[in-house]
Amino acid sequence: MATARILVVDDEEDILELVRYNLAKDGYEVALAATGEEALAAMAAYPPDLLVLDLMLPGLDGLEVCRRVRSDPRTAPVCIVMLTAKGQEADIVAGLELGADDYVTKPFSPRVLIARIRAALRRRTRQAAGDEDAEVAIDDLVIRPGRHEVLVQGNSVDLTFTEFRLLHFLARRPGWVFTRQQIVNGVRGEDYPVTDRSVDVQIVGLRKKLGPAGRRIETVRGVGYRFKE
């Protein structure tokens, strides 16, 4: 049974109760906050494993809470799943740039939210225990950083330095949504200048070279890209 502690922040009482009930039923320890100020105070007293954060809060909004959580060494490792109204693409991008791990749009299914929370906690655990040079194997795709080698169904795929770095960057965190700027920051190309626009060009090239496995690189409209789990 899950034992992670989750702090849910939302100014709507019915949403707080809905999320609390479903998380508690799933075995999580749940704490609640109705404002950004309450959330930061609760985190300072007892940092949770994951923060479910509404962006539209009175006073200190969700984006500012996200920024402060990530800038404080004591709370920086906490997973953050944003709750956002549909159509707030700019806020989604801003939240991801500030370090949020994922987002769920309102209205939402509690089952979907819990699935995203589980995935975020799994990714963070793997990341903490992971090695930059560790092999990544997902179905018929294998990435071997030490050898600079990519195999699809056992066949070697010839990638440029930048394509390899981009694929490895995404595949090490399956399911995690990255903005183009985050990809630029995470991939330092030598044979090709990595810019916000060139990320799209690199993705197109990667998908072609990877064949059917290339479909795992998903476009998240208005936000960026993720590697399908």
Image: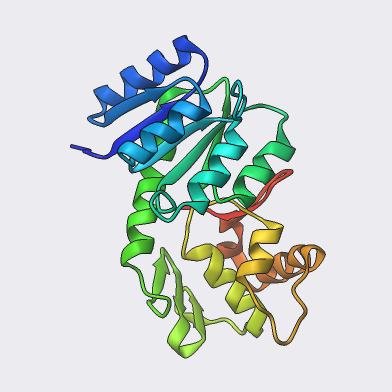
**Which residue lies at the image location 69% right of the left edge and 69% below the top edge?**
208
What residue sits 42% from the left and 56% below the top?
Answer: 73
Residue at the farthest left position: 1
Residue sticking out furthest to the right: 197
Q: Is residue 108 above or below residue 103?
A: above
Q: Is residue 30 left or right of residue 73?
A: left
From this viewpoint, is residue 207 visible? no
The residue at the far bottom in this view is 147
Q: Where does the N terminus fall, quadrant-wise? A: top left
Residue 209 placed where, x, y %? 65, 74
**At 52% across and 29% down in the image, what residue appears?**
36
Q: Quadrant of residue 41?
A: top left
* Count of marks placed on residues: 0
Q: Position of residue 130 (x, y in %)?
A: 35, 69
Who is closer to the viewer here, 227 or 27? 27
Furthest residue to the top?
14
